[in-house]
Structures are given as C-alpha cells and as structure tokens.
Image (cartoon, grey):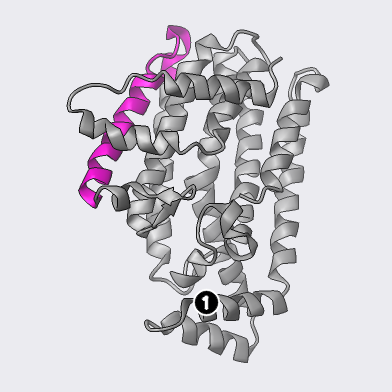
Amino acid sequence: MFSFQQILAQIESEIHRLQLDYPPKSLYDPIEYILSLGGKRIRPALALMAYNMYQEDLTPAMQPALGIEVFHNFTLLHDDLMDEADKRRHKPTVHKLWNPNVAILSGDAMLIVAYRLMGETQAPYLKEVLDLFTQTALEICGGQQYDMEFESRMDVTEEEYLEMIRLKTAVLLACSLKTGALLGGASPEDADHLYAFGINIGLAFQLQDDLLDVYGDTETFGKNIGGDILCNKKTFLLINALKRASESQRETLMEWIGKTDYDPLEKIAIFTFIYNELKLEQLVKAKMQDYYQAALAHLEALQVAPERLEELKSVCNQLLYRQS
C-alpha cells in the first residue's frame, strides 16, 4: 500500500500535469491559480486511499480523484465570492485578484473540467460513479442554500445546522471514499461503510473548522480568525450559545448581532468570552468525539485486513486535530 504522503505526492504531480491551455488562456488562469495554492488535497487522497485498500495500481482511479479535487476547489472559488472573503490559503481570493465576473465564469469552467475528469472513469463503473458525483454536487448546492438562508434566521436549530454541514462538507468526503471503493471493486457493503465513515468524519471535520475560526491562529489557519463571528454565521458555537446563554449573555449577543457599526476585534473578543463562559469549546470537542467513534465503527466493519486501515485512521486523526 502507498502511504498518505506518497499519495499526496502523486496527486500534486498529476495536478501540475493537467492540461488547461485551451483558448482563451485567461479563462483558465484563475483555475491554475486556485489549484496552485495547494491545500490538504484530502478529498482526492481519500479516494485513492479507499481504492488502494482493494487495488495496488492507482492509475485507474487518478483522473476521477482529480475531478473531485477540481470540483472541491470550484466550490471554494464560488464560496469565497459569496462570502466576500479576502484570503484563501494565505493568498488573495480569485474575485479579489481578478473580479467577481471572472470568478463566476472560471468557476463554471472548473465544474465542467471536473466532470470531464470524472468521465475518465473506467466503463464498468462510470454510471455509478457519475450518479454518485452528480448527487453529491446537488447536495452541496443544497447545503450552500441552507447556509445562505440561515444568515437571515435566528431560530436555526442544532439539528438543522448539522444537516447543513452534512450536505455542504461531509458528503464530498463520503463521495471521495465511496468513489475509490467502487473503482477498487469493493463490495456494496464496504462501499456503504466507507461512505458512512466519510459522513461522520466530515461532520467532525467541519466542527473542528468552527472551532478554528474562533480559537485558531490566522498564520496557520490561512483565514482571518473570527470571520464567522463578524458575519453572524450560524455555527454550532453560536447556535448553542444562543440556546444556553443566560438572559444577560443573550442580550449581549443579540445586541452585537444587530450592530452594523462596530470594532471587529471587540466583537470577536466579546463573543469568544461568552463562548468560554458557556464552555462551548468542550461541547464541540465532545460532539466531534461522538462522530469520530461512529466513523471508526464503520471502518472496523470493512471486510479488509486491519493493517490496511491504519493509514486512513492516522490521516483522520490528523484532520480532527489539525490547526489549519
């Protein structure tokens, strides 16, 4: 089996070899830019790791894995535009470096490039893989729609939030793993267990992201700390803060949520202080641990030799205790 680092090296090599030189070149410059920013490459890596549990030669799974990575970066490009984000992986976002129209059009082209790469799937698996990918893409759009709708609601429940992040984040991790399993010839049961594993890891992954937005370091996180607080994003932390707050704490939160003219650092400090009073960091970490244990149960149900699971377990530990 390949190690995680060996798989990442192969992915980076293949990304550099992608042919994006059709005219007009200006359409593809932003695509090359966002792909060049790096990132964890965790989604294509998960696809190849799942495939590698059943097959040794990664070549048949590489193009679909790259398709998943291109699609993921497409979603980031458009998310940054919708969120009016200035930074992505320490660098200016596409709509800041170029303009919003460029971000929209090049993002659309990225989606088409992703489908072209997914179309390189070997014939016996093509329909099932494309159906899974298409369903996942639609679910991610649904998750983004929920996320936008939550911006204008103050009654978002914990259950609604978890469903939103399942759609927006977890399903693509699950799709990556199941795609690799399908291409590797796994049994339907194993493919479903890997999908469920991905859902649970994805939920824990996003909760860690919520924590990092408040408690991370901007130098390692790659984004400005407190961004979710400043735009009143209904995260697991804010939802539980509003649910668990005392009357005075809730009044303070609502007052700052309603402000349009304020010192950003002061708002972040006040929210963080209340989150600390309510011990929300510990609450989030306990929820993450629940998802992690559920994920491991699905991993252990696979009809695969235990030693072939160790690398995937190690990677998931890195994901859940990351600082960026």
Q: Is residue 288 above or below residue 174?
A: below
54 within the magenta span: no
Give the camera-side residue of 130 and 61. 61
- Residue at image location 78% in from the left, 27% down from the top: 310
Magenta part mainly helix, strand or loop?
A: helix
Q: Amino acid at mark 1?
A: Leu
- Residue at image location 42% in from the left, 15% down from the top: 126
Give the camera-side residue of 28 and 62. 28
Q: Position of residue 106 (x, y in %)?
A: 27, 38
Q: Position of residue 19 (x, y in %)?
A: 33, 19
**Residue 281, image quadrant:** bottom right
Q: Left or right: 161 with respect to 313?
A: left
User: Given the current orientation, which residue lies at the most extreme left position?
Assistant: 24
**Residue 231, image quadrant:** bottom left
Q: Is residue 320 above or below residue 284?
A: above
114 within the magenta span: yes
User: Given the current orientation, which residue lies at the most extreme right position?
Assistant: 306
Start-end of magenta stretch:
100-128
User: Given the current orientation, which residue lies at the most extreme bottom position?
Assistant: 248
Q: Is residue 229 above or below residue 251?
A: above
